[in-house]
């Protein structure tokens, strides 16, 4: 089968999920024809994705969160206003997607939580099957933990998530640990890159940090100043930053790098990170304890932190608390559960493609012809 990816470019999680899924598809004889990535003025597309995806990349302007002046807190009102002013730009992006899909004629479009991928079918018909992949689709599961007392943000999160899945034939909800499927979604394992299996796990006495918004750097710097005996290696996605910066003798900041981050994860004492999904999964797989800090104003991350805590990854926190991390220990039990769950992906993919054979028989008939 022939696939095209549409990927949200915010943070590293959706990009690394796409790389992992591409590797999985190719291992079973499928083909990826191209990748569309939603871009942002605040970020550049990481080199590791460009080098490893192995197909032409189409960058398109896409709706993104707007932050406060220090690039820390998400501002919902500003986000809605700024993106509304760019509607004509986003329409051009949808037309660019349409042009690519007409040219490539994929059998399956895989959308990694990019809202343009959900809006596209409202304006253009496609014969391709549409799959959506993300932890966010777990919100349809009765066991999903919503952050309490935030009804408006909860409503907006669910509305946005369902818009990204508009007319999807498969809603694949990534989950820390196994759960039963429901009528609307299939619960699937995290998409971790194959390289993680070959890492040598050790503990070299430093803490690891990852922040999706660079404004959180001030918390890390403050802690490092107050605790000069603690060594911290931090990764961030700051557009104008150098590859490595050393603001303090015991603190280094590194631009997002897939292999470098994984190697640091394998040798750290624990991870403090903004509460995305991918980094927490990697830490669980390697048996590293995690402190999860939801980005201020980003409701889905508040839900992620709760889900990660309930799944045994570590603790949710409102700040980068390395002292709290020092009290946590690694969990071999959680690591074994995660590894067994991730190992189910080849079987899950075979089941999905077999289902497509039934639902879209013309795809296979054309291939045989």
Image: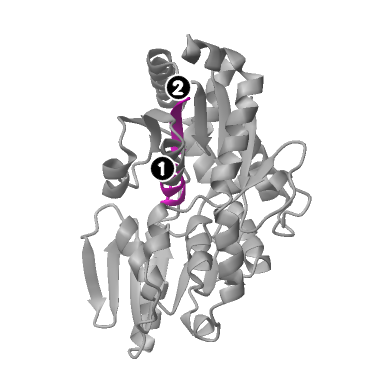
Q: Where is 195 relative to 167, above or below?
A: below
Q: Which residues are magenta?
A: 1-18
Which image quadrant is residue 355 in? top right
Q: Say which residue appears at 31% left-offset and 32% top-offset.
A: 55
Q: Which mark is residue 94?
A: 2
Looking at this view, is 195 or 329 the one in front?
A: 195
At mark 1, the secondary structure is: helix
Q: Is residue 85 visible?
A: yes
In this figure, which residue is indicated by the disc labeled 1?
23
Residue contact between numbered discs 2 and 1, judged by CB atoms under 8 Å: no
Q: CA distance from mark 2 to mark 1?
A: 27 Å
Of circles 2 and 1, the one toward us is 1
Residue 86 can be seen in this image = no
Left or right: 331, with 49 as reference point: right
Give left or right: position of 257 versus 110: left
Residue for point 39% across, 35% down: 37
Residue drawn at the location 76% of the way across and 54% of the way down: 143
Residue at image x 49%, y 56%? 278
The disc, 2 or 1, on the residue closer to the chain's N-terminal end is 1
Magenta region includes residue 2: yes
As rendered, which of 169 and 96 lies closer to the eye?
169
Q: In which quadrant of the rendered view does residue 35 lie?
A: top left
The residue at the far bottom in this view is: 229
Figure check: 79 above or below 262: above
Between 31 and 50, which is closer to the camera in this rendering?
Answer: 31
Residue 18 at what x, y percent from top left?
44, 42
For residue 129, above or below residue 346: above
Left/right placement of residue 89 relative to residue 147 reads: left
Dot 1 crowding, Cα within 10 Å, few <14, some 14–19, many 20+: some
Q: How is the image coloured?
A: one colour
């Amino acid at each position: 089968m022939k696939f095209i990816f549409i990927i949200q470019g915010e943070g590293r999680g959706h990009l690394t999920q796409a790389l992992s899924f591409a590797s999985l598809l190719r291992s079973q004889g499928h083909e990826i024809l191209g990748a569309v990535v939603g871009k942002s003025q605040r970020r550049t597309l990481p080199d590791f994705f460009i080098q490893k995806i192995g197909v032409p990349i189409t960058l398109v302007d896409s709706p993104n969160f707007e932050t406060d002046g220090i690039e820390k807190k998400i501002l919902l009102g500003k986000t809605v206003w700024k993106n509304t002013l760019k509607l004509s730009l986003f329409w051009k992006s949808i037309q660019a997607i349409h042009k690519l899909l007409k040219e490539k004629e994929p059998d399956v479009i895989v959308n990694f939580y990019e809202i343009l991928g959900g809006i596209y079918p409202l304006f253009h018909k496609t014969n391709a099957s549409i799959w959506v992949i993300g932890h966010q689709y777990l919100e349809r599961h009765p066991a999903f933990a919503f952050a309490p007392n935030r009804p408006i943000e909860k409503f907006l999160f669910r509305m946005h998530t369902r818009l990204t899945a508009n007319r999807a034939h498969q809603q694949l909800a990534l989950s820390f640990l196994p759960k039963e499927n429901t009528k609307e979604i299939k619960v699937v394992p995290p998409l971790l890159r194959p390289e993680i299996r070959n890492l040598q796990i050790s503990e070299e006495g430093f803490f690891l940090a990852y922040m999706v918004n660079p404004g959180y750097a001030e918390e890390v710097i403050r802690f490092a100043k107050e605790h000069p005996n603690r060594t911290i290696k931090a990764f961030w996605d700051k557009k104008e930053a150098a590859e490595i910066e050393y603001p303090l003798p015991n603190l280094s900041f590194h631009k997002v790098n897939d292999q470098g981050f994984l190697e640091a994860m394998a040798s750290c004492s624990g991870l403090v990170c903004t509460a995305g999904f991918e980094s927490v999964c990697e830490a669980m797989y390697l048996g590293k304890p995690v402190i999860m800090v939801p980005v201020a104003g980003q409701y889905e991350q508040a839900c992620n932190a709760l889900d990660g805590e309930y799944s045994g990854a570590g603790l949710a926190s409102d700040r980068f608390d390395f002292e709290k991390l020092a009290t946590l220990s690694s969990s071999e039990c959680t690591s074994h559960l995660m590894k067994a769950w991730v190992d189910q992906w080849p079987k899950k993919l075979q089941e999905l493609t077999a289902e497509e054979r039934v639902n879209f028989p013309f795809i296979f008939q054309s291939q045989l012809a």
